[in-house]
Image (tube, rainbow, N blue to C red):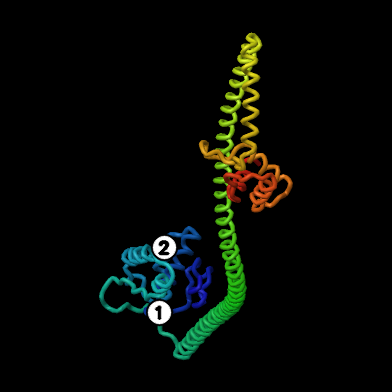
């Protein structure tokens, strides 16, 4: 009831059909009619009985000159449009001038006035002007209060915006400090990464060296295994030969025991063998290397092992053997080199 209050129209005036305030037809807006309609809906009153009567009293127009049906249909059309509008568009429709549909095209007739004393007429005019000024004052006050509220809202919004700005500035400062911290952390991490990369390269080099050494040792291990297998085979073959020789000797001894003649011959053979051995001992050559088998005999290998067990250096083993042979008056046919001695030591270990 904003427009009604501005004009000074009360609910009692509307119920009793006693609207004493007159306005010009151009001052009649659609918002005022909407307020009238809402009041009728609240009070459950018929639109035909009140609507046209209120408008005729307000605009000081004869009710006969207003086309009632056209007025109500025009209002309903505009009211339907208003329902679909929001915000500024709704405000514009409410403040729109509402042109009254009249019965004839002629200007609306004023109500026939009785002949009244000019002084009374002057007083009534003064009262009307006073009422209008009061209405204007009320509207101005209303607008002022409206403006004040708007100013308050704007100031509050400005304060809120200021706070938001301050918060945003604080956030930016926090962000900048965080960024600086992150940069320092990144630099420290970069340094650590460099250190780690150098360490990894060193570790890689060490690992490569270790791999090379392991390959060397594995090769040596496999070689030693092969030599061990070969020696085992040789040992087996020699043991078989020895067993065969022993069996042959036993057979021969049995035969010699049976036949005395053979024993005598055997004695003679023994003597001849002894003689030959003495002759062999007299020879200056000391056989250490077997030319047929292309390897050193077992006695030389045993001598080398014993010397190495006595902690004789590897490079001095062959000179020691030569020296001992010289003392005995023998010349060795071949001496083992340091490389072969090393190989043999590894094989037998």
Q: CA distance from mark 1 to mark 2?
A: 23 Å
For mark 1, does the 10 Å Cα neighbourhood hold few (<14), some (14 to 19), or many (20 or more) residues?
A: few
Residue at mark 2:
49
Q: Which residue is labeled 1 in the image?
A: 27
The image quarter in which residue 226 lies: top right
Viewer-nearest residue: 166 or 99: 166
Residue nearer the viewer, 21 or 209 = 209
Residue 190, numbered label: none
Q: SS of the residue at dot 2?
A: helix
Rendering coords of residue 321 (x, y %): 66, 47
The answer to whether residue 55 shows anywhere in this view is no
The location of residue 154, given as percent across then percent down, is 55, 79
**CB atoms of marks 1 and 2 within 8 Å:** no
State whether residue 34 is above or below residue 271: below
Q: Given this view, does label 1 or label 2 mark the residue nearer the observer?
A: 1
Front residue of 127/274: it is 274
The reply to whether residue 209 is in sight is yes
Q: Is residue 103 left or right of residue 163?
A: left
Name the side, left or right, on which 309 lies relative to 340: right
Between 125 and 176, the one nearer to me in the picture: 176
Residue ID at (33%, 78%): 109
* Residue 31 placement, left or right of 234: left
Marks 1 and 2, the one that precedes in the sequence? 1
Q: Where residue 141 sits: x, y (%)? A: 55, 83
In the displayed structure, would residue 158 be above or below residue 201? below
- Residue lying at the far left of the rendered structure: 105
Point out residue 89 in the picture as x, y percentages from the top left corner: 39, 71
Q: Secondary structure at mark 1?
A: helix
């Amino acid at each position: 009831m904003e427009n009604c209050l501005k004009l000074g129209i009360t609910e009692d005036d509307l119920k009793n059909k006693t609207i004493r305030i007159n306005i010009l037809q151009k001052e009649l807006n659609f918002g005022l009619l909407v307020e009238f309609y809402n009041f009728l809906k609240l009070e459950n009153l018929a639109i035909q009985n009140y609507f046209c009567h209120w408008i005729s009293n307000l605009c000081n127009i004869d009710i006969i000159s207003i086309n009632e049906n056209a007025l109500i249909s025009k209002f309903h059309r505009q009211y339907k449009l208003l329902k679909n509008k929001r915000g500024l568009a709704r405000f514009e429709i409410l403040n729109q001038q509402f042109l009254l549909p009249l019965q004839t095209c002629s200007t609306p007739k004023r109500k026939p006035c009785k002949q009244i004393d000019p002084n009374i007429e002057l007083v009534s005019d003064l009262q009307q002007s006073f009422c209008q000024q009061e209405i204007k004052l009320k509207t101005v006050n209303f607008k002022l209060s409206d403006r004040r509220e708007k100013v308050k809202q704007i100031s509050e919004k400005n304060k809120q915006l200021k706070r938001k700005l301050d918060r945003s500035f604080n956030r930016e400062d926090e962000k900048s400090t965080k960024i600086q911290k992150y940069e320092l952390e990144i630099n420290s991490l970069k340094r650590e990464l460099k250190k780690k990369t150098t360490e990894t390269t060193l570790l890689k080099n060490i690992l490569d060296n270790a791999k090379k050494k392991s390959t060397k040792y594995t090769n040596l291990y496999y070689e030693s295994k092969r030599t061990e297998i070969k020696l085992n085979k040789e040992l087996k073959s020699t043991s078989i030969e020895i067993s065969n020789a022993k069996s042959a000797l036993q057979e021969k001894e049995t035969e010699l025991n049976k036949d005395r003649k053979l024993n005598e011959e055997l004695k003679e053979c023994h003597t001849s063998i002894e003689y030959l051995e003495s002759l062999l001992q007299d020879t200056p050559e000391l056989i250490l290397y077997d030319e047929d088998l292309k390897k050193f005999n077992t006695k030389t290998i045993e001598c080398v092992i014993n010397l190495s067990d006595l902690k004789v250096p590897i490079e001095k083993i062959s000179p020691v053997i030569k020296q001992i042979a010289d003392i005995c008056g023998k010349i060795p046919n071949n001496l083992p080199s340091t490389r072969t001695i090393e190989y043999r030591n590894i094989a037998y270990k």
